[in-house]
């Protein structure tokens, strides 16, 4: 190759830095010659062939008329310089063509050099300005050196304009892709987007993978979290199983060096993460990225790293919002969501169960919260191990698990069986039980939270009986529950407005019918004047916890009344007050008894607390402690409704109570049914055998009273002697007696 003759212009050009294009594979500068004179084509090409400009060889395209040129420009792209003859078909054909190129074909990057044979045909200044014409030369000026200089200037300016435009397009893409990626919330989805956007930025087809590096407690591992093109099948596999050593190598290099890696056929970008999950994206590149690409990649990576932090943060927030942090299973919100999805899918053969651990709060209080946590974890593990993998298991409340799955699998027997084997906690076995509320989704109307409410209603029915029971939701339960809720509201209002009051039913000795005591019984007369039976509102007050304040009020009012009776001259009368299990369990119960005793100033021996037999037998150790504390204060204890529960005789002996109260149902039957008569007889014998006094309730006839007296029953209570009376009536009754 012969060196071109060197002139001044040429020297200046050489002194300037060459753009860093050398990384690209061979590419030409494309030069279009438009001229109606074939000699000009040949001379130009001849003068410049084998002469590289700015490190690239030239490639010539030829057109011989304006029409030719337009057709050609419609097909070809990336033309750096157009050498255009001004005078062709007409004197200004060249100028008109320039207008079409810029305005109609919208070609703005290509540089245009006008040439003319006659110096008189110089274009107007306006045309040079308006149509972005680079240069104007007469053909005689186009010596080899002049041509070289002219083209070099034009190519450099084309290259710069092209680079500016490419970087503007690239930055635009980065902004758009960042916005697009920010909208993605899952890491997988985000990573998949990174491949697409990166390939777009480098103008390549998406072929590659994105990996995340986990520094877990054990061995570190790198997983493929997104894959595109021929890699698509490798998603979610460990990188080591990819089977493409070159790819694996590049990614490992990037992760270790914490830097991008560029090779002849790939680009691997590294995205550091503050939260400890570094990411690397590998994409296949047929030509290595050039200087401009590098800059864009840097900007892209900065954006992606921020996006990645966002995604990880979002994942963390989502985890906090939807997962139970103690047990690492879905929480209530997530469970409601799953339920709503199943309902929306119209998957009807599914059942929802709420599994509530019995007496959890007592266990938690007694044995400590860390024990409670261990216990919950053990139950969660057992549920997961026993139920099929596609069952949803969630924690919906402190001690309540939600289970959602096929009707055939979510069944009470299966769930109860889970609790049959004791749980081994801290090296000792604990026997647990659970109450279960179930709802078939076919029985449920509404969304997930409505379904959960139904299962909760069923659960409250299951818990109404002894623990360990189950109950399926039925539609009429809801009505029942709704009316209970209304009744409870009314009860609260009645209590606040002093519409509750106490009546006192006399208790007499059966031998001489002397009034020795009274039982305080609560009454509620509503605004319409109707009496609501205690059997209806007491259980409601118990399950809602209202019984605590209500019961305390009854105790105080009864004791203050007793004081009043004493002032009216009625001495040594015993006051029996009913106490429910919820009151008994309350940690402040004994303290409230003490407060009432000191406030009323009554003799503690005159106060008798009635607890039902089933309650007394429920948690023996606890009851024993409570009864002993009451005895220390001199307060008496009677077992109410005796005969209806299942007393353990040895327990009864040790419980240290004062009196057994024979349930009214035996009394009412004793004259007709031999069995009732025998039961009454047995209770009297038993009571006396244990040194307890025995009282019979619900005595309505003289016959019953006589029969009871004949059996040795000490005391009696019932309509035969007196109905429950208001305070004043009672004082009058006793005076008359
Ligand atoms: P209980 O403690 O067994 O009360 C005896 C019930 O028998 C009372 O019903 C009383 O009115 C009724 N009775 C009395 N004599 C006769 C009779 O000759 N024939 C018939 N058929 N019944 C008679 P009451 O007042 O309706 O109370 C029902 C239950 O409500 C009580 O049964 C008790 O368990 C509960 N209760 C009432 N007041 C209170 C209270 O202040 N606190 C608590 N925890 N429970 C209460
Ligand atoms: Mg009673
Ligand atoms: Mg009773």
Image (tube, rainbow, N blue to C red):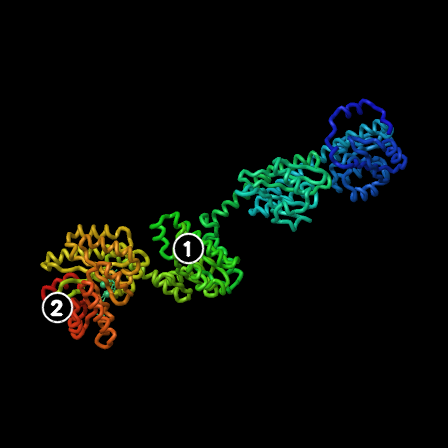
Q: Position of residue 569 (x, y in %)?
A: 9, 59
- Asked if marks 2 and 1 touch (Cβ < 8 Å), the reply is no
Q: Position of residue 616 (x, y in %)?
A: 27, 60
Q: For disc 1, does the CB lie below 8 Å from ligand 1?
A: no
Q: Is residue 290 left or right of residue 259?
A: right
As drawn, the residue found furthest toward the top would be 8
**At 58% from the left edge and 42% from the top edge, which residue is drawn?**
213
Crowding at mark 1 (Cα within 10 Å: few <14, some 14-19, many 20+):
some
Does 46 sit above or below residue 491? above
Q: Quadrant of residue 485?
A: bottom left
Question: Do we see residue 181 in this rendering?
Answer: yes
Residue 423's label in the rendered image is 1
Which of the marked residues, 2 or 1, is nearer the chain's N terminus? Answer: 1
Q: Quadrant of residue 126?
A: top right
As drawn, the residue found furthest toward the bottom would be 672
As drawn, the residue found furthest toward the right would be 39
Is 24 in front, or is 275? 275
For disc 2, the marked residue is 513
Does 466 sit above or below residue 265? below
């Amino acid at each position: 190759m012969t060196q071109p003759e060197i002139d001044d212009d040429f020297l200046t050009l050489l002194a300037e830095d060459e753009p860093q294009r050398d990384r690209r594979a061979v590419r030409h500068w494309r030069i279009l010659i438009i001229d109606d004179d074939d000699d000009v084509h040949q001379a130009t090409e001849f003068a410049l062939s084998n002469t590289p400009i700015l490190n690239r060889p030239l490639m010539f395209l030829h057109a011989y008329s304006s029409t030719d040129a337009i057709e050609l420009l419609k097909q070809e792209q990336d033309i750096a310089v157009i050498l255009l003859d001004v005078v062709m078909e007409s004197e200004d054909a060249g100028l008109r063509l320039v207008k079409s190129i810029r305005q109609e074909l919208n070609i703005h990057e290509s540089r245009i050099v006008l040439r003319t044979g006659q110096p008189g045909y110089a274009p107007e200044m306006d045309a040079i300005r308006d149509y972005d014409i680079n240069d104007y030369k007469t053909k005689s000026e186009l010596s080899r050196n002049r041509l070289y200089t002219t083209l070099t200037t034009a190519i450099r300016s084309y290259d710069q304009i092209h680079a500016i435009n490419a970087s503007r397009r690239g930055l635009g893409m980065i902004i758009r892709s960042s916005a697009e990626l920010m909208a993605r919330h899952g890491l997988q989805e985000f990573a998949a987007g990174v491949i697409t956007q990166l390939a777009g930025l480098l103008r390549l087809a998406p072929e590659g993978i994105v990996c995340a590096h986990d520094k877990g407690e054990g061995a570190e591992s790198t997983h493929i979290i997104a894959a595109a093109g021929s890699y698509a099948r490798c998603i979610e596999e460990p990188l080591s199983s990819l089977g493409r050593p070159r790819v694996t190598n590049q990614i490992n290099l990037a992760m270790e060096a914490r830097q991008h890696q560029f090779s002849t056929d790939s680009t691997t970008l590294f995205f550091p993460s503050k939260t400890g999950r570094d990411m690397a994206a590998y994409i296949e590149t047929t030509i290595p990225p050039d200087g401009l690409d590098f800059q864009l990649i840097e900007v892209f990576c900065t954006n992606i790293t921020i996006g990645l932090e966002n995604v990880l943060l979002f994942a963390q927030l989502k985890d906090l919002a939807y997962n139970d942090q103690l047990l690492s299973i879905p929480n209530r919100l997530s469970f409601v969501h799953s339920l709503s999805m199943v309902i929306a899918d119209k998957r009807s053969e599914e059942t929802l169960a709420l599994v509530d651990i019995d007496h959890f709060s007592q266990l938690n209080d007694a044995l400590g919260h860390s024990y409670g946590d261990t216990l919950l974890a053990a139950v969660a593990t057992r549920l997961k191990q026993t139920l099929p993998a596609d069952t949803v298991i969630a924690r919906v409340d402190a001690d309540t698990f939600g289970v959602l799955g096929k009707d055939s699998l979510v069944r009470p027997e299966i769930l109860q069986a889970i609790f049959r084997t004791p749980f081994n906690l801290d090296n000792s076995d604990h026997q647990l039980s659970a109450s279960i509320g179930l709802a078939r989704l076919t029985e449920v109307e509404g969304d997930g939270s409505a379904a959960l409410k139904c299962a909760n209603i069923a659960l409250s029915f299951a818990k109404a009986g002894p623990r360990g029971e189950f109950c399926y939701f039925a539609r009429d339960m809801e009505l029942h529950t709704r009316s209970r809720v209304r009744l409870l509201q009314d009860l609260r209002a009645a209590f606040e407005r002093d519409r509750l009051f106490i009546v006192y039913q006399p208790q007499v000795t059966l031998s001489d019918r002397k009034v020795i005591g009274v039982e305080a019984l609560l009454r509620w007369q509503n605004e319409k004047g109707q009496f609501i039976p205690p059997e209806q509102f007491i259980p409601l007050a118990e399950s809602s916890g209202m019984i605590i304040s209500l019961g305390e009020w009854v105790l105080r009012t009864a004791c203050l009344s007793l004081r009043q009776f004493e002032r009216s001259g009625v001495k040594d009368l015993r006051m029996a007050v009913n106490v429910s299990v919820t009151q008994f369990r309350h940690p402040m119960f004994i303290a409230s008894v003490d407060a009432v005793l000191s406030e009323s100033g009554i003799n503690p021996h005159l106060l008798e607390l009635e607890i039902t037999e089933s309650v007394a037998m429920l948690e023996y150790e606890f009851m024993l402690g409570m009864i002993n504390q009451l005895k220390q204060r001199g307060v008496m204890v009677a077992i109410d409704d005796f005969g209806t529960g299942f007393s353990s005789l040895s327990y009864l002996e040790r419980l240290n109570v004062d009196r057994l109260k024979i349930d009214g149902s035996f009394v009412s039957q004793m004259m007709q049914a031999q069995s009732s008569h025998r039961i009454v007889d047995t209770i009297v014998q038993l009571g006396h055998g244990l040194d307890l006094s025995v009282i019979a309730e619900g005595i309505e006839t003289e016959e019953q009273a006589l029969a009871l007296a004949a059996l040795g029953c000490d005391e009696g209570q019932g309509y035969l002697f007196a109905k429950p009376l208001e305070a004043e009536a009672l004082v009058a009754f006793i005076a008359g007696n």
